[in-house]
Image: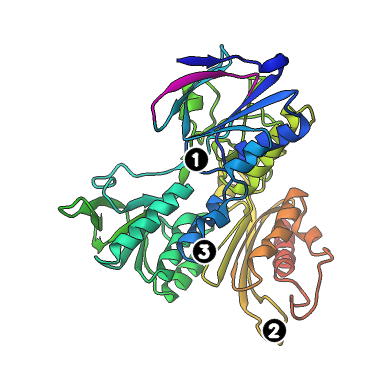
Amino acid sequence: MSESARTGAAGRERLVVIGGDAAGMSAASQARRLKGPGELDVVAFERGHFTSYSACGIPYWVGGDVDERDDLIARTPQEHRARGIDLRLRTEVTEIDLAGQRVRARDVDSGAESWTSYDDLVIATGARPIRPDLPGADAEGVHGVQTLDDGQDLLDSLARTRAHGRHAVVVGAGYIGVEMAEALIKRGYLVTVVNRGSEPMSTLDPDMGRLVHEAMEGLGITMVNDAEVTELLADDDGRVRAVVTADAEYPADVVVLGIGVRPETALAEAAGLPLGAHGGLLTDLAMRVRGHENVWAGGDCVEVLDLVSGQERHIPLGTHANKHGQIIGTNVGGGYATFPGVVGTAVSKVCDLEIARTGLREKDARRAGLRYETVTVESTSRAGYYPGASPMTVKMLAERRTGRLLGVQIVGREGAAKRVDIAAVALTAGMTAERMTTLDLGYAPPFSPVWDPVLVAARKAAVKVRDARG
């Protein structure tokens, strides 16, 4: 087993990065921009075939909205190497030796192992799909969707099933589940979504999730809520044929697991690094792993501060991962940057239905010990008399005593989702609902009613808060 020296030629420092997607390669690239090859060696390990790609785009590639897999790749391995990064694909880090400041890596194809020493280490191992421990979960035709390799495997499976049938079952109804249900509908499948929650999109309150439920059924998707999968049945060839719950059996030529993800932190945990309540690595504001001066972490494997509740959360999003990487690379490269936290903003869609949320749901507010008021308003995306105006539902939470904005959820058609950004800025600024009503937002009939739907909700929330105070 070979071992690389800690410092490169002429005493250069070495940065080692574990993980070749958003956070990892952003950190590597930013550190390289700030420190040239004469000052810093950068070595990055990636166990898959691809780097710097959009995992969020995989459902749209599967559904045919994105034509080619390579369209999702922001920067190829060759481009990274041309910028002076020693990128090693199909190489999995299997051990971190904190005392010796080195990592052990294994070539996935040959099995050969070697140690590489570091001066700074970045852990960007991402998240892994939750795969239920159920009979039949390993049958052919059962897919998680987290990486480009996963997406290609699913497309290959769909090509094979055309000769057998057109039934697809999606297990789970979060962002991935809902987006994959749409993708499979576009592929011509009969889609059933089995969801253990009372409504799809548990990132919304159930009353808003109900709107998503109705829209999905309008697209021909069969929604099965309050249902726990107990078994996956396979045929004699080992290929999945049905999904079983306590009450029914649903035929399936392909199954997609959209249950969610967990931080991929087994490697970090084995090394004794600190994990939070959700299993993610804990870092300081500079994205340095707590208690470890030269170990950094970012992306889907970390927990982040929720600026609204003040609690740590696991929010796996590419937006955060890229920011984490930039901050880590800046700090490793000799600069200074911090990541203050998030408000939990996310958007999605089911065909033409747009779904958005930011801040806290009702159960989040209760868990944080906050007392709150809620309002729900119906409005339109444009002035009601302007052609193309479509309905929109906005729900807002405000703290009872102070009127501080706590959260906003929006479900509607064209022009609905990105309105949540207004609320995200207001949450970050700590604004009250009443203060929001004075925001100077753009207006013209093709874009908005005179009172934007978010401001209508803010106005009603402010009144409700005042009435609650007596």
Q: Residues within 10 Å of mark 1 (few under 14, many from 20)?
A: some
Earlier-in-chain disc, 3 versus 2: 3
> Left of 68 or right of it: where is 328?
right
Q: Nearer the viewer, residue 357 or 280?
A: 280
Q: CA distance from mark 3 to mark 2?
A: 36 Å
Badge 1 marks a residue whose secondary structure is strand
Residue 195 seen anywhere in this rendered image of the structure = no
Which corner quadrant of the image does residue 191 belong to?
Answer: bottom left
Q: Secondary structure at mark 2?
A: loop
Percent across and percent down for residue 64 are 48, 66
Residue 187 lies in quadrant: bottom left
Mark whose residue sits in front, 3 or 2: 3
Q: Amino acid at mark 1?
A: Ala
At x 34%, y 65%, the residue is: 192
Give the extent of the magenta segment: 110-120
Q: Residue 67 — which label? A: 3
Looking at marks 2 and 1 on the same chain, the residue that comes earlier in the sequence is marked by: 1
What's the residue at 63%, 20% (across, down)?
A: 292
Q: Position of residue 447 (x, y in %)?
A: 74, 76
* Real-space Cα separation, disc 2 to disc 1, in angstroms: 44 Å
Residue 116 in magenta stretch: yes
Who comes first in sequence, dot 3 or dot 1? 3
Secondary-structure class at tag 3: loop
Query: Residue 393 location in percent, x, y?
Result: 61, 70
Which residue carries the number 2 mark?
A: 384
Residue designated by label 1: 127
The circle on residue 417 is none
